[in-house]
Image (cartoon, grey):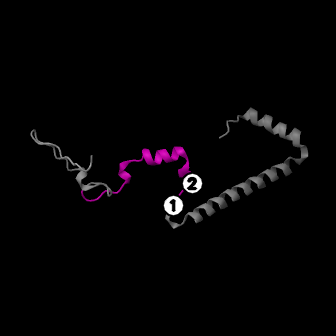
Amino acid sequence: MFDVGLGEMAVLVVLALVIFGDKLPQVAGQAGRMLRQFRQMADSAKADLQEGLGPEFKDFDLNDLNPKTFVRKHLFEDEDTYPKNDSGLFDDEPSYATTTTGLGPSEKPPFDNEAT
């Protein structure tokens, strides 16, 4: 997350000692408590959101709303993860999807006057 080297970390520690002096342990404790409170607030907000969505969204994950995760999940997911029925088709795929009948040389394609 942060690209901080050993030298940069030492400079930050010395700077913190100069600025805060002997109050550094108190400041660090307050920062830790504040971070813990932020995490608790975020967790409770997430729980409230999932509770408000209802049982149909019980396995809903907020990370799915991240655009990268959404695209990866919905566009690059393997077809093997979807259940297939006995005929080798996906459950929501119509049965005529695999029946491709070609037209003969003198046959005309079907035409529907109401569809056009």
Q: Is-magenta flag for residue 61?
A: yes
**Left-right relation of 84 to 1:** left
Residue drawn at 88 percent across, 38 percent down? 18
The image position of residue 105, as x and y in percent, is 10, 38
Residue drawn at 90 percent across, 46 percent down? 22
**Left-right relation of 17 to 105:** right
The image position of residue 47, as x and y in percent, is 62, 62
Q: Please determine whether, in this image, residue 18 is positioned above or below residue 60.
A: above
Who is closer to the viewer here, 14 or 70? 70
Please name the residue that numbered disc 2 is placed on. Answer: 62
> Tag count in the figure?
2
The image position of residue 80, as x and y in percent, is 35, 51
Q: Please determine whether, in this image, residue 41 is positioned above or below residue 5.
A: below
**Left-right relation of 116 to 35:** left
Q: Is-magenta flag for residue 65?
A: yes
Who is closer to the viewer here, 23 or 108? 108
The image position of residue 59, as x and y in percent, is 51, 61
Q: Secondary structure at mark 2?
A: helix
Q: Residue furthest right?
A: 22
Q: Residues within 10 Å of mark 2 (few under 14, many from 20)?
A: few
Q: Which range of residues does the magenta coloring cover?
A: 60-87
Task: State the quadrant of the N terminus.
Answer: top right
Q: Residue furthest left?
A: 106
Residue drawn at 43 percent across, 45 percent down? 75
Amino acid type of the residue tagged 1 in the rendering: Asp
Q: Please determine whether, in this image, residue 46 is positioned above or below residue 31.
A: below
Q: Secondary structure at mark 1?
A: loop
Q: Residues within 10 Å of mark 1 (few under 14, many from 20)?
A: few
Amino acid type of the residue tagged 2 in the rendering: Leu
Structural distance between the alpha carbons of marks 2 and 1: 10 Å
Residue drawn at 47 percent across, 45 percent down? 72
Residue 59 — which label? 1
